[in-house]
Image (cartoon, helix red, strand yellow):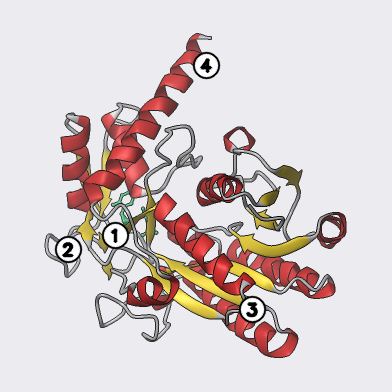
Amino acid sequence: MTNDTILVVGGAGYIGTHMVKDLLQEGFQVVVLDDLSTGHHDLLPGGDFIQGQIGDRAVLDRIFTQFSISAVMHFAACSLVGESVENPIKYYRNNVSHTTELLAAMRRHQVNHFIFSSTAAVYGNPKIQPIPEDAVLKPTNPYGTTKVAIEDLLRYCDDAFGIKSISLRYFNAAGADLSGTIGERHRPETHLIPIVLQTALKEREHLNIFGTNYPTRDGTCVRDYIHVTDLTRAHLLALTVLMNGGDSAVYNLGNSRGYSVRDVIDVSQKISRRKIPFIETDRRPGDPPELVADSTNAREKLGWQPQYEDLEAIIETAWTWHRNEAKKNECICKG
Ligand code: UDP
């Protein structure tokens, strides 16, 4: 048990809800700040909930005054590569300006521990796979660029104000909590695994494979899928490091195994025992061909050990969640 209170910004989102559940299970007090622009209040497992924007100075001051916050975990970013290409201002406003306000509030209230959700998109099209943390940062889309900007700012905030941070560069978060009660719900959905499973559930006629002429094994993009509860375990380890006086750091979080879009479809067909129709279309702007993590540092320095190392195990949990969601939606419609 612990008396520490953690502010989870974006705690009603996909990774945020899993994080809140994990923190509560570990005995932390949790305060969630979320504007519900993409999050879902009905999926929140608990904690004190405040609806508001992360860039709202008054809201932030109220939270930091009312609660004795030991650390902040920040999940409230816009995170879609395609959308960031179409609307870069939205990405800079939310991911850079609002996060800067959050850090300014932490400074005003002397909260000095920050866990930041970064991304594999910071690397762009790296030459080396799996990608180590010290690879060149050359994002190919505004989403990745905004994350690099905050990683830079965090280094300066450590030097200037002593705010210690751990940036966790997620590869492709996937899967759902084993309970089947929380999982990935985006509206509209753009991520591959949910779209494939919704197609299996006949909620979509087919899915599009974005690009089949990439320089990869089967011509489709290769990603490193990492289970959401493995991600939240890494956050808990990072939090412990910071609360014990550890230094700022950056870690990749992935399984170090690459799966193509076609692999995801094949595995999903096997798990769902359904035929999943797809059509091959043009590339989606901003997508790098391959992103696979070298996560040696997280394993060695944080003691992180992912539990879900293969795609089948990950998709199995997502399938349970999506079937539950489909049943829920059916009841509401019949309702
Ligand atoms: N993808 C696809 N069809 C879809 C959604 C995604 O072919 O309907 C591809 C996408 O181009 C990328 C991979 O699947 O290569 C993973 O995309 P996702 O949006 O899930 O995650 P990202 O890698 O962009 O963070």
Residue 82, numbered circle: none
Q: What amino acid is at disc 4?
A: Ile
Counting residues from the start of the chain, the first of labels 3 and 2 encountered is 3
Measuring 45% from the left and 42% from the top, which residue is drawn there? 184
Q: Which quadrant of the structure image shows residue 77?
A: bottom right
Looking at the image, which is closer to me, 219 or 30? 30
- As rendered, which of 175 and 82 lies closer to the eye? 175
Gap between marks 4 and 3 measured at Cα = 46 Å
Q: Vertical placement of 75 versus 118: above or below?
A: above
Q: Which mark is residue 283?
A: 1
Residue carrying label 3: 164
Residue 203: % across, % down: 35, 28
Q: Ligand 1: does it lie within 8 Å of the C-beta at label 4?
A: no
Mark 2 or mark 1, earlier in chain? 2
> Callout 3, which amino acid?
Lys
Q: Label 2 to label 4, Cα distance in Å?
A: 42 Å
Q: Mark 3 and mark 2: span between their CA atoms?
A: 43 Å
Residue 133 position (above or below residue 238): below
Q: Earlier in the sequence, mark 4 or mark 1?
A: 1
Q: Which residue is mark 2?
A: 213
Contact between marks 3 and 2 (CB within 8 A): the answer is no
Q: Is mark 1 within 8 Å of ligand 1?
A: yes
